[in-house]
Image (cartoon, rainbow, N blue to C red):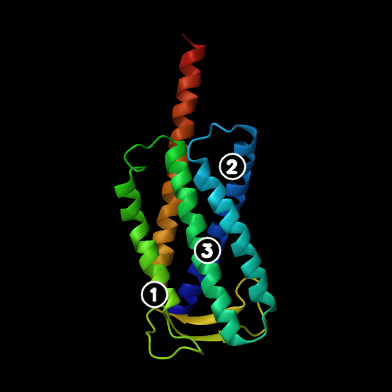
């Protein structure tokens, strides 16, 4: 039951990553057309790291051995986490959320992601024994080879916590964008009717 739940959450996480990657590319276009966009440095960093993450994911599909697949997967997941946080910071700055864009707030919000990345990077793998199995306890190549998830893991609680925290960041980002759009619509309405 837990593995099935983890597979569903992983698919949702990949969908969220795709949403963030597409949105980052769209807003990168906005940056190139209007260089006065607040937080654009995070947007460009996210787009650049996202390109690298996408290339790693393609590499994950073609790398033949399990140890290399796990190594590439760790790199992809770490880069995808960076893309997610860069997107969040960009939206926070772009929407003018002064409280959230303070360095202290950003460090607090990034700390769980850094902890999850460290736990993922130090998890047991076929080459390295003796670290821990908090993120996953076993990994195999998916049979038949899957395109969306080329590896099958027996995920632990830390993975589920990371997925939940990442989902919270995506939902918070979307809420900030909706609130910003609603505020903008109200300002346009007031300007037309005064």
The answer to whether one can see residue 115 in this image is yes
Return the residue at label 2: 27
User: Mark 3 or mark 1: which comes first in sequence?
Assistant: 3
Q: Dot 1 lies on which element?
A: helix
Label 2 or label 3, whichever lies nearer to me, is: 3
Badges 1 and 2: C-beta atoms under 8 Å apart? no
**Quarter of the image where the N terminus is located:** bottom left
Tell me if mark 2 has few (under 14), some (14-19) or many (20+) residues whose alpha carbon lies within 10 angstroms of its own.
Answer: many
Residue 104 tag number: none
Tell me if mark 1 has few (under 14), some (14-19) or many (20+) residues whose alpha carbon lies within 10 angstroms of its own.
Answer: some
Badges 2 and 3: C-beta atoms under 8 Å apart? no
Return the residue at label 3: 79
Position of residue 37 measured from the top left corner of the image (x, y, whole percent): 53, 34
Toward the right, the furthest residue is: 62
- Report whether 45 appears left or right of 26: left
- Report whether 16 appears left or right of 102: right
Out of 55 and 187, give the one closest to the viewer: 55
Return the residue at label 1: 119
Q: CA distance from mark 1 to mark 2?
A: 31 Å
Position of residue 84 measured from the top left corner of the image (x, y, whole percent): 49, 56
Out of 178 and 122, give the one closest to the viewer: 122
Q: CA distance from mark 2 to mark 3?
A: 19 Å
User: Mark 1 or mark 2: which comes first in sequence?
Assistant: 2
Position of residue 177 measured from the top left corner of the image (x, y, whole percent): 47, 40
Q: CA distance from mark 3 to mark 1?
A: 14 Å
């Amino acid at each position: 039951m837990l593995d099935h739940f983890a597979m569903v959450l992983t698919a949702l996480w990949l969908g969220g990553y795709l949403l963030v990657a597409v949105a980052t590319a769209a807003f990168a276009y906005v940056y190139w057309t209007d260089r006065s966009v607040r937080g654009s440095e995070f947007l460009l960093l996210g787009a650049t790291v996202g390109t690298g993450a996408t290339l790693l994911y393609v590499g994950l599909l073609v790398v033949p051995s399990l140890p290399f697949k796990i190594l590439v997967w760790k790199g992809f997941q770490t880069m995808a986490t960076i893309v997610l946080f860069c997107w969040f910071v960009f939206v926070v700055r772009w929407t003018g959320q002064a409280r959230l864009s303070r360095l202290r707030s950003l460090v607090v919000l990034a700390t769980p992601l850094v902890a999850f990345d460290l736990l993922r990077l130090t998890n047991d793998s076929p080459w390295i024994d003796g670290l821990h199995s908090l993120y996953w306890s076993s990994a195999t190549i998916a049979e038949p080879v899957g395109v969306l998830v080329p590896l099958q893991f027996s995920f632990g609680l830390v993975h589920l916590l990371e997925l939940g925290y990442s989902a919270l960041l995506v939902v918070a980002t979307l809420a900030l964008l909706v609130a910003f759009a609603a505020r903008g619509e109200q300002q346009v309405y007031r300007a037309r009717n005064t």
